[in-house]
Image (spheres, rainbow, N blue to C red):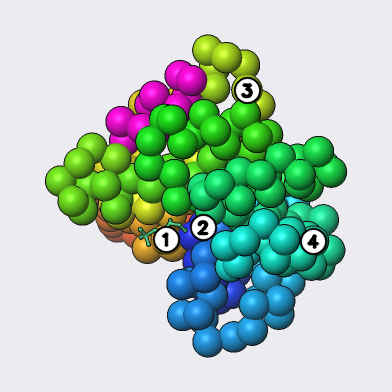
Amino acid sequence: MKIFVDTGDVAEVKQAAEWGILDGVTTNPTLIAKSGKGFKETVLKICELVPDGEISAEVVATDYDTMLKEATEISSWNPQIVVKVPLIEPGVRLVRTLSDRGVKTNVTLVFSVNQALLAAKAGATFISIFVGRVDDISGDGMEAVAESVQMVETYGYDSQILVASIRHPLHVVQAIGAGAHICTMPLKIMQMMFKHPLTDAGLKRFLEDWNNAGLNIFEKQPAGV
Ligand code: G3P
C-alpha cells in the first residue's frame, strides 16, 4: 500500500520524506490556505522534496471550462502533479478529458461506491474516499472504501482507491484490511504509526543491558587479536 502525507506544510513533507517511506503528497484548498504560502510555490517545493512522488493539487472552479483551464495550468508546473478534481458533474467530465490526454487525476470528496464508479469510468487515477468525515456524523466511512476496492477489482478498472480524511491509526489498519491501494494521512498519524509500548520497553531494556555490561561498538581490539 502506498502512503501519502496529507498536508500543505512543506516542513511536514520534508520530515515524512526523510523516513524514505513516502510515496506522495495530497493537498487540498484548505491545507494550502492553512500553509500561509502561495499555491504554485508550495506545490513545486513539495515536488522537489519528494522527487519520485505523486503530488495532488486541486482545482477550485466548479464549471467545466474554468476547471479545465486550471487543470491545464496546474499540470504544466511539474510532471509529478496529479490534478485533484471534486466529484461533481463537470468534475467527472474533466477527469475524462484529462484522462484522454494522459494527465493523472485524483477524484476527491467521494463518499459512496456509486460516486467511485463514476470516477473509475471517467478514468480517474486515484479515487479519494473520505472516511473521517463520515465517522464524524456517526456513519461507517470505511464501508465505501471496501465496496470501492471490490468494485474496481470486479470490473477491472485501473483506478486506485485512496483512503483520505484519516483521523487515527486504526483507520490505517482498516484501510489495509479493506485492500485499499493508498492511504493519505496527516504527519501526526504517521508518527503515531511508529509507536508501540513493547517497542519502547524492549529498546529501553536492550540499552540498559548493553550499557550495564560496558560494551562499545567502536571499542579497539587489543593488539594481537
Ligand atoms: O485531503 C483530503 C482529506 O484527507 C481531508 O481530511 O481531516 O479534512 O476530513 P479532513
- Outermost residue toward the left? 138
**Whole-percent x, y for residue 153 in the image:** 54, 17
**Res. 186 mark:** 1
Distance of mark 4 from mark 2, alpha carbons?
A: 24 Å
CB atoms at circles 4 and 2 under 8 Å apart?
no
Q: Earlier in the sequence, mark 3 or mark 4?
A: 4
Q: Few, some or many C-alpha atoms within 10 Å of disc 2 (few <14, some 14-19, many ≥20)?
A: many
Q: Earlier in the sequence, mark 2 or mark 1?
A: 2
What secondary structure is marked by label 2?
Answer: strand
Can see residue 18?
Answer: no
Q: Residue at x 33, y 45 (%)?
A: 131
Q: Is the CB–ligand 1 distance for label 1 below 8 Å?
A: yes
Q: Which residues are magenta?
A: 142-151
What secondary structure is marked by label 3?
Answer: loop
When the figure is inspected, residue 9 is found, relative to residue 113, above or below; the finding is below
Q: Earlier in the sequence, mark 2 or mark 3?
A: 2
Q: Is residue 146 magenta?
A: yes
Distance of mark 3 from mark 4, alpha carbons?
A: 24 Å
**Whole-percent x, y for residue 139 in the image:** 20, 41
Q: Amino acid at mark 1?
A: Pro
Quarter of the image containing the C terminus? top right
Residue, disc 2: 5
Distance of mark 4 from mark 1, alpha carbons?
A: 28 Å
Residue, disc 4: 72
Residue, disc 3: 157
Q: Is the CB–ligand 1 distance for label 2 below 8 Å?
A: no
**Whole-percent x, y for residue 121 in the image:** 62, 29
What secondary structure is marked by label 1?
Answer: loop
Q: Residue at x 68, y 70 (%)?
A: 43
Q: Earlier in the sequence, mark 3 or mark 1?
A: 3
